[in-house]
Image (cartoon, rainbow, N blue to C red):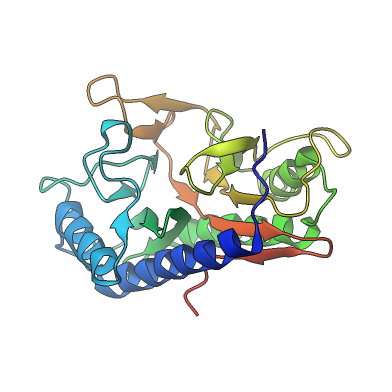
Amino acid sequence: MIIIKSDSDLRRMRRAGEITGMTLKAAEAAIKPGMSTKELDGIIEDFIRSRGAVPSFKGYGGFPGSACISVNNVVIHGIPSKKIIIKDGDIVSIDVGAYIDGFHGDSAATFGVGNVPDNAKKLMEVTKASLEHAAEIMRAGVRLGDIGNAVQSYCESFGYGVVRDFVGHGVGRDLHEDPSVPNYGKPGHGLRLPKGATVAVEPMINEGTPDVIIDRHDGWTVTTADGKLSAHFEHTFYIDETQAHILTNAD
């Protein structure tokens, strides 16, 4: 069941979203070659807590970090580690959430570190643009299939693989609420989004095959099946009659 947010709910979600967006900005400013993903995670946690919020992800389902930090061929759910050192030319996907006043924000972005190769730049550019294409059509009454198709058709036109095993979702008092929001679909199909819905749309786009592998040892880390790069962008949106409003901008 989709939970419709009241004006009061929305005010608090805007605050959670703002902190989430600011956290991504802080992470982008901090990231550098030679840094471990564990060190970056500490910076992210400190920033979230300095704003009076708590990291949504820490302890969620047993996840040990405050952020999911996924490097190169890691699609999502990368566990911060002292052993993973960020290098020049890497692309690093950072997925963060902030919880304050009873509500969550959820957002992600992929950042290039230093001298990033052209193929990685293009993947990031297309993935980010696919989220923007989806946002352009989002309003009350739009079908989930239309949103998914906006992402899928754009990314596949560049020969990229759209991950199907993981999807976007509702956000609110719980980090993951109804509905599921796939990054693929058929136009005119699926549930219609109502006014007052708040959803996280998050294209996860692979340079090669859409297939992924879940690490059987840690149960979290998701990598591309072919070892090629992956990028990830996400915003939390509020839906009204005319458009989708981004709640996780930093300003």
What residue do we see at 16% from left, 52% from top?
A: 38
Please provide percent x and percent y for residue 47: 25, 69
**Left or right of 13 in this view: 111:** left
Using the rendered image of the protein, determine whether residue 162 is visible from the camera's viewpoint. Answer: no
**Left or right of 57 in this view: 150:** right
Quarter-of-image position of residue 28 = bottom left
Classify 48 as above or below 63.
Answer: below
Classify 140 as above or below 186.
Answer: below
What residue do we see at 32% from left, 66% from top?
A: 113
Classify 228 as above or below 249.
Answer: above
Residue lying at the far right of the rendered structure: 188
Residue lying at the far bottom of the rendered structure: 251
Between 78 and 115, the residue placed more toward the observer is: 78
Quarter-of-image position of residue 145 = top right
Between 75 and 134, the residue placed more toward the observer is: 134
Using the rendered image of the protein, determine whether residue 242 is visible from the camera's viewpoint. Answer: yes
Please provide percent x and percent y for residue 178: 61, 36
Please provide percent x and percent y for residue 67: 30, 51
Please provide percent x and percent y for residue 205: 55, 44
What residue do we see at 65% from left, 64% from top?
A: 7
